[in-house]
Image (cartoon, rainbow, N blue to C red):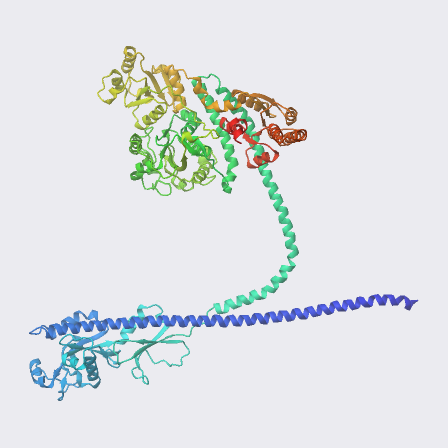
Amino acid sequence: MGVGGGEPVSAVEAPAEEAGKDVKGRWRVKVRLSRLAVLLWVLAAAALWLGLHWRFRRAALRKAEEGLVSMCEERARMLQDQFAVSINHVHALAILVATFHYEKQPPALDQDTFADYTARTSFERPLLSGVAYAQRVVHADRESFERQQGWIIKTMKHEASPVQDEYAPVIYSQVTVSYIEGLDMMSGEEDRENILRSRATGKAVLTRPFRLMSNHLGVVLTFPVYLRDLPADAKVEDRVAATAGYLGGAFDVESLVENLLRQLAGNQELVVNVYDITNHSNPLVMYGSEVPLGNPSPSHICMLDFGDPFRKHHMICRYRNKPHVPMSAITTPSGVFVIWMLVGYILYAAWSRYDNVKEDCRKMEELKKRAEAADVAKSQFLATVSHEIRTPMNGVLGMLDMLLDTDLKSTQMDYAQTAQVCGKALISLINEVLDRAKIEAGKLDLESVPFDLRSILDDVISLFSSKSREKGIELAVYVSERVPEILLGDPGRFRQIITNLVGNSIKFTERGHIFVQVHLADHSNLATEAKVEPVANGMNGHKDEAGAISTSVSHNTLSGFEAADSRNSWENFKHLLSYETNEMPYESDSDKVTLVVSVEDTGIGIPLDAQGRVFTPFMQADSSTSRNYGGTGIGLSISKCLVEIMGGQINFVSRPHVGSTFTFTAVLQRCDRSAISDSKPVTLHPLPSNFKGLSALLVDRRPVRATVTKYHLQRLGIASEVVSTIELALEVLSGRNDNSLTSMKQPSMLLIESDSWGLKVDVSLCTRLLEIKQNSCEPVSPKVILLAAVESDKLKAKYTVDSVITKPLKASTFATCLFQALGITQSSNEKHEGSGSLRGLLLGKNILVVDDNKVNLRVAAGTLKKYGAKVECVESGKDALALLQVPHKFDLCLMDIQMPEMDGFEATRQIRAVEAKADEQTETEDDSETDSTAKAVKWHLPILAMTADVIQATFEECTKCGMDGYVSKPFEEKQLFQAVQKFLDPYIGSSD
């Protein structure tokens, strides 16, 4: 039993042991193979290192040889050029001798003249230690020659020259070689050979190198002098017969090469040798020391041509030291070796990290989903905040709109309109917050719709009118007549830029004025091009703030205070006005219009050290700015981004304690009134036409301010003239003025600036004015209207005027005040001119409004009823679903999105389901395709989202659930018209 029971165990353990042995064996084999692979890998890396090292070393040596060849060729070329220059100077000297010694009788050249000339011109031959001229003398003329010279011809050993066929005694010599004067140059064997070769060839010939008196190696240059010009192919006999003498000089080769090498870079790296190799078996050194030809350093040989066809020369260049092995020949192979060794480890690490990477990918996917969810949550948060703010604002603006439809006094109308503008500005600020992320992401798109620029500027003036009156500052706007009435662009963004700039000016200005100007870029450039001050980086360039403090001197500006930018002076303003009066055409190849808008103030200015960060987001000039004036510092940065998106630029000029002027350009498009379609209406805020044909006389001592007032009168169709004082105005009214103003008809009104009245007008002038009013022969005497920057109920009684118009001026307020002062009744057509098209669409239509907010329901119902619609209101999506069961009577549904129980999305989906079910039943009951189509169109009720949420995600959700459009609260006439036109306009419906 014991044995039998043990056998199975042994039978089981044996395969396990064998399997273990196989595993161990395979492990050992893997270890051996891995070791062998590592060894082979290392050997391959070592072989690769050696191969790369040899390759880099050979490349470095080849590069050094190429550099040696280049430097040696350069030195050889320059050596030949300088030698040729010296030969040319010797040739010129030979021509001088031939001209003045032989062609002049008697000769105009003697030893003193030659010595003086060669000494003065030695700078032209710096490499010649001296020059001398030897005359050719035949034996027959020797006696007369010696008698003429006063000395006998001597040999090189200073002995009397023996009898020979001809001689070459030196007659002229430079002072440095005067010791050879009278010596026969043909008495030396080599000199004789050179003389014979030079006159036979007509070229300069050289001797073999020898030591000069300066102990430098050099050669003697010999050049023939002929009695006449010879052709290049003259025979030897002709040359010998024409030979007059020989000009020679000692050439310092060592100095030449030394000077040359000093001028070139790399001189310290090379060793240069110059040889005379006329005898190849025994080359003669002309420069340098003997260098064994077997030197391991690379060398290069350049042949030299010194102009002597008999003698041969060359230059040998080599490196002073053997080229070093470059570090790249060691570092690069070593780096490759390290990389090669790391490859195996990287492969192993990559495989071992595979699972970790998979886990990281899973985590990244999860984080991505979380980030997307966070982005959705952020969008939902912005939508909720926008909705919660816009909901009460919808009630405020709606009630103000309804209030404006009632009969109000001019002051009440102004207050209500200003409150409405402020509310709309708050809505725009909410949009700013929502658009900030779009600006940073570069996804902000601009609208391209027609708009009235002047109306926008009037709205901005209304927004800040109360603040300007509180501070007692002038706030004015002027738009050039050349600027088109209707432009195509983004009015909201343009208004946002102007609001930011004017708001900053209001905030930092305590006295003086704020002046907004709009001109065409071409005309503005013409008027200001010659007046630009040196401005750097938007700064005025003052060295200190003390030098920028304004003085008390009155300036010719809107308020009399100095402005920061001199380009906005009255002189330039007059230039711009002259372009308008001359009706200068605006020539352009395209419909684009570039506007130049400037906002000038006389505030505290910007400190010089803070001007560089004005457009930085969330940055103030200093810590006290935000503490004293408030603000986040984001307005200018947003304005800069918007201006650049509009294709323009913004800059500024600011002087501390004087003020600031911000100027920007914007590229818009022209838009003719006839090109405006009904699908894109423009809120023009039309001005009344009741004043056309009237005239006014304006008393204002400030021409800029008078021009602004004339601009507003001109918009109302009132012709006006300006005088500077009340005395002149009284003369005009009484007909005693001799100037051109007497030709104007009796003015309907007399407009007087408060400072023109209050400064020097006394009781007598007031009495004269009253007398003119009482005794006027005109059936209607002119109304006296006071223009005042500060509100006061006592102004009218104090100055005995018919009316007081409170600044800032804008056309609509101006018109309202004139209606009251002149007793003109405004027609009802003009009051409601802008709403005619929308009334035509909504008149008699049944509209269902769904909103959980009772105030919003009241506002929406009041607005729609104003345009003639029949409105029914419900407060939940369930109630709307109950009313919209097919069949129903409604033509349009405006549905809020965020409602309790059932929101607008779900309600719309169920309404569409009900309509689809009804259409399906109709199709089964009637096989007619035409009738079925009619039923399908009939039971598709236009549903427009009516919500305070304005983000893109909400719009996409509206489209997805089946809504037909989108109207943000609070909606305006233009927006509502665009939304409902395609559903309620029968013409558009039939075309579709």
Let me know if residue 287 appears in the view: no
| 684 displayed left or right of 252 | right
Rendering coords of residue 209 (x, y %): 26, 81
Residue 241, compared with residue 442, is above or below; it is below
Rendering coords of residue 354 (x, y %): 64, 57
Q: Quadrant of the N terminus?
A: bottom right
Q: Quadrant of residue 474?
A: top left
Residue at far right of view? 1
Q: Quadrant of residue 752?
A: top left
**Viewer-side residue, 19 vs 990:** 990
Residue 927, compared with residue 774, is above or below; it is below
Q: What residue is shown at x 30% (from left), y 18% (from top)? A: 747
| 58 displayed left or right of 166 | right
| 772 displayed left or right of 100 | right
Residue at far bottom of view? 163
**Viewer-side residue, 743 vs 648:** 743
Rendering coords of residue 202 (x, y %): 20, 77
Q: Quadrant of residue 178?
A: bottom left
Let me know if residue 127 appears in the view: yes
Q: How many marks?
A: 0
Rendering coords of residue 54 (x, y %): 49, 72
**Viewer-side residue, 964 vs 546:** 964
Residue 96, compared with residue 874, is above or below; it is below
Residue at far top of view? 775
Residue 945, compared with residue 652, is above or below; it is above
